[in-house]
Amino acid sequence: MTFPLKELSRLLAQDAAVVGSVVHVDGTRVRVATERGAVMARTLDGLTVGDRVLIQNGIAIKAPVAQQVFPV
């Protein structure tokens, strides 16, 4: 049994950002493969298959990439 206040806070909480890779583009909607499975999201960027994206609140944007690479 859950308490109403706890349920309300769960519903109002911000979604955590999820990182994934674009596997299908259909206009402004994209299908993204994540560690939790495939997710459909909207996008404002021009994305192509294979792009790494960050999904937050149902919107997919290009994920930041490293600007410098250091040899290990």
Image (tube, helix red, strand yellow):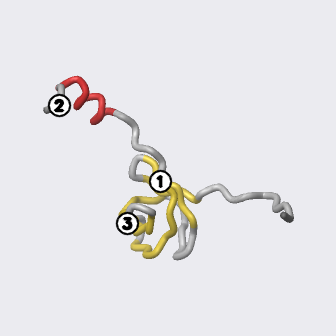
Q: From the viewer's perspective, tell me whether residue 65 is left or right of residue 56.
A: right
Question: Taking 4 as reference, is 41 above or below it?
Answer: below
Cα gap from disc 1 to disc 2, whole angstroms: 26 Å
* Amino acid residing under circle 3: Gly
Cα gap from disc 1 to disc 3, whole angstroms: 11 Å
Which of the 4 quarters of the picture holds residue 13? top left
Judged by depth in the image, the label closer to the viewer, 3 or 2, is 2
* Amino acid residing under circle 2: Thr
Mark 1 and mark 2 lie on one chain; the one further toward the N terminus is 2
In the rendered image, which residue does mark 2 sit on? 2
Name the one closer to the observer, 22 or 72. Answer: 72
* Amino acid residing under circle 1: Val
Name the one closer to the observer, 72 or 48. Answer: 72
In what quadrant of the picture does the N terminus appear? top left
Name the one closer to the observer, 26 or 32. Answer: 32
Hey, which residue is sitting farthest right in the picture?
Answer: 71
Q: Which mark is residue 37?
A: 3
In the rendered image, which residue does mark 1 sit on? 18
Q: From the viewer's perspective, tell me whether residue 49 is left or right of residue 10.
A: right
Query: x and y percent of residue 53 in the render?
Result: 54, 61
Judged by depth in the image, the label closer to the viewer, 1 or 2, is 2
